[in-house]
Amino acid sequence: MIRRLVLDVLKPHSPSVIELSEALSKLEGVEAVNIIIYEIDQHVENAKIVIGGNRIDFEGVKKKLEEMGAAIHSIDQVAAGERIIEEVGTPQDRSARV
Amino acid sequence: MKFLEKIRDYIRISGVAPIGRRYFIMNAFDGATTILGIVIGAHVAEITNQFWVIWSGLGATIAMGLSGFAGAYMTEEAERTKKLNSLEKSMLKKLGKSVVGKASRFAPLWAAIIYGASPAIAAIACLTPFFLSPVGVFSINFAFQLSIAIALSVMFMLGVFLGKVSGRSILFHGVKMLLVGLILTLVFLALKAII
């Protein structure tokens, strides 16, 4: 069962993030939604959408986003299972950064 | 209830509300002015049969309504299609089935209904005394006076509405609109005096 979903989404200016977050939060299994716009173009905007819940239905989320005129660019993070496990830092991450 | 909510969503997403407001004022004013012209013309011509006024008024009303509906629908539809195509290019996907596409298809219809109905509503309001005149509620002369008064009141109220929308003096805007009707009345009376 999916508990957290982080998506990179391209969407038109309208419907707004307020309408989009409200629509997503009404989906079954979704408990919380966070949307941040990180780039704005003339007609569209890029948004990072974080969805939290106890049983997120990815297909339902995808369908709702398409219904609202948005398109998923990438799935950036998924947390599934009995509980959420956070990303763990490793020495390799440090050397990769150097 | 769900249907009304959907309409509200489409209006918000398509951003058609200000256009609708503009269309409403513009065309209701057109409707009132046209009927005022017909009524004053008939009065000056000393027409004694109210059905002449009713039929010429209804003819103008239907023509205004139909031309408004068709004109607004076609114009708005072309604009909305262009806008949606441009958005689809930016999104790199078709949006026809999304709420954006649906709102884009709804907007021309909404604009057309307002464009078509607003002159008709104003015109019917101005013609009401003539509908009541054949059943003996008013004499034809009183119907003329009442109809002119209603047309001028409609104009004033539209001005008041404009003043309210713009957040400026409602009285100033009301009087400004009313002046157009008064000018029309004076021009007719002057014409009658000359001819």
Image: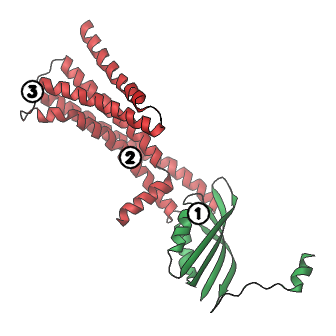
Foreground tag (2 vs 3): 3
Identify the residue at horizontal 70%, vertical 79% (top origin). Answer: A77
**Does residue A50 sit above or below B158 in this rendering?**
below
User: Are there few (<14), some (14-19), or many (20+) residues within 10 Å of tag 3?
Assistant: some
**Which quadrant holds the N terminus of chain A?**
bottom right
Q: Which residue is more in the foreground, B73 or A73?
A: A73
**Chain for disc number 2:** B
Is residue B94 among what the camera can see? no
Return the residue at label 3: B139
Q: What color was chain B assigned in the picture?
A: red
Q: Quadrant of residue B186?
A: top left
Q: Viewed as shown, does residue A19 lie left or right of B45? A: right
State which tag comes first along the sequence, 2 or 3. Answer: 2
Residue position marked by numbered label 2 in the rendering = B112
**Measured from the top left, where is residue B163 in percent x and y?**
43, 34
Q: Name the residue at 18% across, 28% down.
A: B53
Q: How many marks?
A: 3
Chain A is which colour? green
Place residue B157 in its image quadrant. Answer: top left
Percent position (x, y) of residue B76?
Answer: 46, 46
User: The numbered mark 1 sits on a residue in which chain?
Assistant: A
- Can residue B179 be seen? yes
Q: How is the image coloured?
A: by chain
Q: Chain of mark 3?
A: B
Horizontally, residue A63 falls left or right of residue B3, namely right
State the CA–CA distance, disc 2 to disc 3: 37 Å
Residue, far top: B194
